[in-house]
Structures are given as structure tokens and as C-alpha cells.
Amino acid sequence: MFDSHSCKYNIFDAHLHGVNFIQQTDGFNALLQEMDKARIEKCVVFGLPVVKQWSEWENEEPTYYLADESRCYYYSLTDAIIARAYMDLNTEDQNRIIPLICGFSPVDRYAIKHIERMTSLYPGIFKGIGEILCRHDDLSNLTYGQPARINHKALFPIFDFAAQYQLSVLVHQNATSIGRSNQLTYTDEVIEMLDRFPNTRLVWAHCGVSRRVKIEKLHEVIDRLLCKYNNLYVDYSWLVFDNYICPDGKPDPNWIEMTEKHSDRICIGSDIFGHFESLAEGLARYTPFLDCLSKETCDRVCMLTAEKLYASASTI
């Protein structure tokens, strides 16, 4: 019998942070236990490229980027935390975890050097790049340094590197500013990179949505881009699912139609971070939407697209 506290479909979770915003984690053994409860066969895991600062005027320890007004800063050790946790697993469990590398500043033209160093220190572990945090909501304003954007020159050699090794690049880039609804202010930056790097697989996290990002007929925007760019993929994770795809638990027919059309370039993810006890419940909310899809489409969205993007990739 179907347990309403877990998804009724087998899942390849394509978007999960192994640590939280202060780089804490329950550990991969705890993650694997929760994966079993949630019917997750495999999971794409990455760190968080920024860490929340505990400012001296704050009496309470912040654990989330919105906990207070203190800033965030880039934190490269996040990749080593993920790599070491992966290395401590046995071979059978390693086959269920797909680590990505993300611990670099996307506005630093030396960022590619970090990837080269990490893959030299931990060869054969990482199978992709991301989640790169670019245009965001309040996180952009809270992070030290210039605002990150997907078409910054620092990311050009990284996209070339990904194409060379046939790796996917997962990027958070809001489609527009939180103050400019329906204008697609930052979408041209995504399009520039799709045009500039046609041989690089770009996975657009959350379909370009985060808090307070409002775009009418977002499904039409995503449909047009998927039709035009064969190197574009999207993941249904975080707020795009709750606010657009399945608001109030009711699947939107427009997103069902769009998903049927592009199922080979859509995957789903939990987007939880560091603590994993909510994994099963978080993915259970996808069930009403998945129930509306054809079996072939459901198989692709739940498993096969993520398998193609990540599990079948070469390690670096």
C-alpha cells in the first residue's frame, strides 16, 4: 500500500545539498537511510558554495542564509567535506551517490583553478559541476563581493571544461529580479551561455525561480527555450514546484503538457540541505503531479533524465 509520507515512485533525486549553510551535515549514512525510506535509488549531492557568517552582534547562531542580516562568503572546503564523506562509503553505497563540485566563487576568474585542484586531490569522485549560485533572491545581496551571474567571464573556462569532459553544469540563476515581475530581466544571460557553449549541458535549477520571483506563464518560457536549445535541461525543485507546477497540491495542466513534451530534459530534486529527515515527505508531494503523467514521461522525469545527466557521466 502507498505510504502518503513518501513518494510512490522510485526516484533519482537530482538536487540535494549534503551540507547546510554553516556546512553541517547528518552524514551520508544518515542520507542513505532516508533515501531508502523515500524510495530514492540514487542521489546527486553537492555542498553549498557559501557559508553564513555568525556576526558578533548576533546572540543566536544562524543556520540559514535568511536567519539574520549577517553576510555569506564563499567557502571552498565544502567540496572536500562532500568528497571525504563519499570516500568513507563502501562501493555499493558510493554507486548511489553522485557528487558534484561547487565550492568556488563564480565571479573569480581563478575559479577553474579550484576545480583543477579538487579533481587532482580527489580524482574519480566528482561527476558534474554545481549548484553554482548566480542570480538569487536575498542571497545575492547577502554574499560578499560583486553579484554573481551566469554569463560572468569567470564561468567561461568552467563551461569549456564541462564540455571537454561531458559534464553537466547545474546553475541557479533567477529568470528575473524580485522587483521586476514578468520582465525576464536575467533570462538573456542564460541564453547567452546556451549560445556560447552549445556543447555544454546546462541544467537550470528550479526553472529560474526562487522567492518572490513572479513570472506569468513560466511554462511557456521554459517550453520555448527547451525547443530552441538542445543543451538545456531543467530541474523541478524547490519553489517552482510548489508555486507554479503544483500549487496547493493541484497539478497545473499547462505544466503537465509541457512535461510530456520535454520529459527527456526534466528531472526532479528535493533541494534539502544538510539534514535529511524530511526527504521522504518532501518528495511525497510530487506524487499527485507524477500520477498525471504517462508512464514513459514519469520514468524519464523520475529516473532516466537524471541518469543521463549525472550517473552516466565520466568522473573527473
Image (tube, helix red, strand yellow):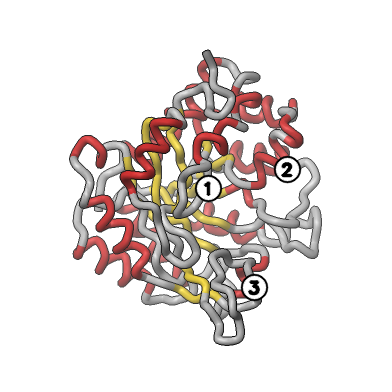
Q: How many marks?
A: 3
Q: Pick whichever of labels 2 and 3 is earlier in the sequence.
A: 3
Residue at disc 3, secondary structure: loop
Residue shown at the point (54%, 17%) measured from the top left: 2
The image shows residue 243, relative to residue 255, as above or below, that is: below
Identify the residue under disc 2: 243
Query: Which percent across, then down, holds residue 74?
Result: 45, 73
What number is the disc on residue 52? none
The quadrant where residue 186 appears: bottom right
- Neighbour class for label 3 at 10 Å: few (<14), some, many (≥20)? some
Residue shown at the point (64%, 73%) measured from the top left: 68
Separation of residues labelled 1 and 2 (CA atoms): 15 Å
Q: Amino acid at mark 1?
A: Asp
Identify the residue under disc 3: 68
Q: Is residue 179 visible?
A: yes
The image shows residue 39, relative to residue 166, as above or below, that is: above
Q: Pick whichever of labels 1 and 2 is earlier in the sequence.
A: 2
Identify the residue under disc 1: 271
Q: Pick whichever of labels 1 and 3 is earlier in the sequence.
A: 3
Q: Are marks 1 and 2 in contact (CB under 8 Å)?
A: no
Residue shown at the point (56%, 35%) measured from the top left: 281
Query: Which percent across, then down, holds residue 238?
Result: 61, 46
Q: Amino acid at mark 3?
A: Asp
- Neighbour class for label 1 at 10 Å: few (<14), some, many (≥20)? many
Query: Which percent across, then down, holds residue 52?
Result: 52, 72
Residue shown at the point (58%, 74%) measured from the top left: 60
